[in-house]
Amino acid sequence: MLKRSLSLTLCILLLSSCANAPSETQVVEQVTSAQEASVQQTEVQSSNAQQPEKQIAAESNAALEQSIEENQDTATSDASIDETAQVSLYELFLSNEATVHIDSENNLGYFLSNIEPSGMDATLEDLVQLMIDSLDEDYGYSGTTIESIEYAFIDCGNDGNEELVICVTTLSIDYFTNYIILKEFDGQLKPVYVKVDGVRSQTFINEYGYIMSDGSSGASYHDFVKEYIDGNGKYHYIYTSMSATIIIFDEYGGDLYFNNEFHNLSEELLGILEGNFDFFQIDLYGTLEDDSDDVYSYARSLEYDNSGDGFRGYFYCNLDDDESIYDDSFPLMQYFNEQGLQIYSKKEIDTMIETKEIQEGLTQEIKNGKVVTWTLLD
């Protein structure tokens, strides 16, 4: 009886314990709820940790975009400045919005002769006024007017860099043509060549800076000057050829100047010569006031030189290559030997000129460039 009572009591206690314990579903739900709470807490912590990183990344991206925009603006600005300085500076000068600097270092004579030692910065209008003032002063004339202003872009030395050449035609007591070549040096224009032609002279400038001038002081006397401006704006003197016609169309051309005096050829000598002859005095050193270093020659002249009025040679006509006229037995050679004047053959003169051209860096490509085509400035 006692055993049954004890067993009953134990059963009741067991049932009571089972009734108070959580069910399987409740346990699972409690575990799931705990896990979700843990995950949520972790996400919150992760979100809180990532928030500063996102903000820093966003700020960094914004700064990078701003830097790129500023660099693009700077590059655009620099390109604009470079374009204005390197491409448009000549055009700005042509529209009186830029100046050319003239000082004692680039005082090249003619209308640039009277520049103050301190120098000056001149617009195109100022430059033209210098031309007018120079002509008025030289000829005592006060009514010089501008007939035209023309310009062209050239490539001195054929190095790919542009220079500007300006041609101003003025009317004073006669027509005068004023030339000036400008080159840009570190954002500043400077003159590298000037020339003024009168009514009986002319200047040809080609696309690569080769320059030929010719003039006449009478029907029988002519001169040719060859010059060159290289890619650095440096001036190169090549030679000056002064010619006198001895015989033309069976007529006596004129007296010959050498040994510091004029010489009249005898009728007997002229009667022996057959064909047209011309006498040449060549200055290879630019010492125009000193004849002692000049070289002399003569040649039989042929047809008129239609290739460019002596542009590639040193006379208006083509010259005969006959070397026999330089033999000691030839009448003209005999005459010059008697006068003590050394005569060189045309072939020897050509070799001297070719040597000088090589020394000065003047190539056939540069010599054979096209003569500039002028554009009238409005």
Image: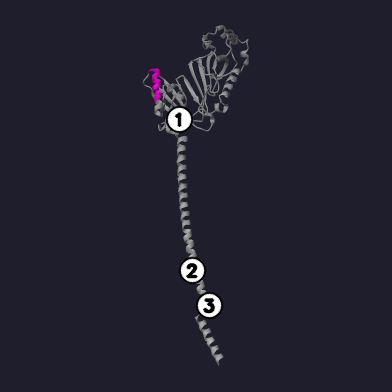
Spot occupied by residue 334 in the image (x, y as percentages of width and height): 60, 9
Label 1 and label 3: CA atoms lie apart by 99 Å
Camera-nearest residue between 169 and 356? 356
Mark linked to residue 24: 3
- Report the magenta residues as a range: 129-140
- Choose top left, top right, bottom left or bottom right for residue 121: top left
Mark linked to residue 37: 2
The residue under label 1 is 189
Q: Is mark 3 on a helix, strand or loop?
A: helix
Q: Is mark 2 on a helix, strand or loop?
A: helix
Spot occupied by residue 218 in the image (x, y as percentages of width and height): 48, 15
Label located before the other in sequence (2 or 3): 3
Q: Residues within 10 Å of mark 1 (few under 14, many from 20)?
A: many
Q: Is mark 1 on a helix, strand or loop?
A: strand
Label located before the other in sequence (2 or 1): 2
Label 2 and label 3: CA atoms lie apart by 20 Å
Q: How crowded is mark 2: few (under 14 residues within 10 Å), some or many (20 or more)?
A: few
Front label number (2 vs 1)? 2
Residue ID at (48%, 68%) = 37
Label located before the other in sequence (1 or 3): 3
